Amino acid sequence: MEIEKLKILRTLFPGTLILLGLLPAYVYFTKDPVEIGWTLAGVGMVISYGLGTIYNLYCLRKVFNWRSHERITDNIKQRLLKIGRTLPVTRERAEEILKTRSLMDIFYKLVDSDNTLKE
């Protein structure tokens, strides 16, 4: 899939999920059943794109995913520390290394050097 389509979907998908999540609340509070038609589908697409844009602009992904990202980052650091040692490391030194961003910098350099992961 082309990168431009992926960028559009990255905005549209969260907005669609937000809209679908709000739809039951709309029906509950207004007591107005929603009929899905071509007009509503078109308006829904525009609203979804708008909600997705707000989601991306205000970095709400960080609000919802910070715990997961923290676990992933810790896992990457632990594995790099485990496989990257040539000499034994004391516990204090290992904790010091894990607190810095040096292991993540190494990880990003490894990922950036892999041609299969580029656009």
Image (spheres, grey):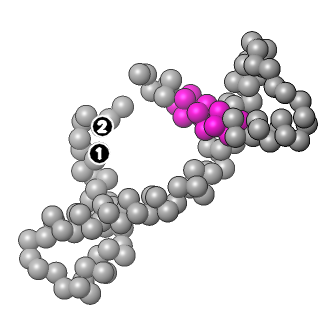
Which of disc 2 and disc 1 is earlier in sequence? 1
Residue at left offset 58%, top offset 55%: 64
Q: Amino acid at mark 2?
A: Leu
Inspect the magenta stretch and tell me whether residue 105 lies in it: no
Q: Residue 73: give x, y in percent of width and height.
A: 37, 61
Classed neighbour count for the residue bearing mark 2: other residues with Cα under 10 Å, few (<14), some (14–19), many (≥20): few
Q: Nearer the viewer, residue 11 or 18?
A: 18
Is residue 54 visible to the viewer in this orientation of the structure? yes
| Residue 77 drawn above or below residue 60 | below
Check whether the beta carbons of the residues at disc 1 and disc 2 lie within 8 A of each other.
yes
**Image position, residue 99 (x, y; %):** 37, 76
* Residue located at (88% from left, 41% from top): 29
Report the number of numbered marks: 2
Look at mark 1 in the image and give the residue it sits on. 112
Q: Is residue 26 left or right of residue 22?
A: right
Secondary structure predominantly adopted by residues drawn in magenta: helix
Front residue (pair 37, 52) = 37
Quarter that holds the C terminus: top left
In magenta, the rendered stretch is 7-19
- In the picture, the disc for residue 117 is 2
9 on left or right of 29: left
Q: Nearer the viewer, mark 1 or mark 2?
A: 2
Q: Which residue is nearer to you in this view: 11 or 114? A: 11
Residue 45: where, in percent of width, then height?
Answer: 70, 24
| Local secondary structure at mark 1 | helix
The residue positioned 69% from the left and 35% from the top of the image is 20
Look at the picture and state if 20 lies above or below 101. above
Q: What's the residue type where badge 1 is placed?
A: Asp
**In the image, residue 95 lies at what x, y percent?**
30, 81
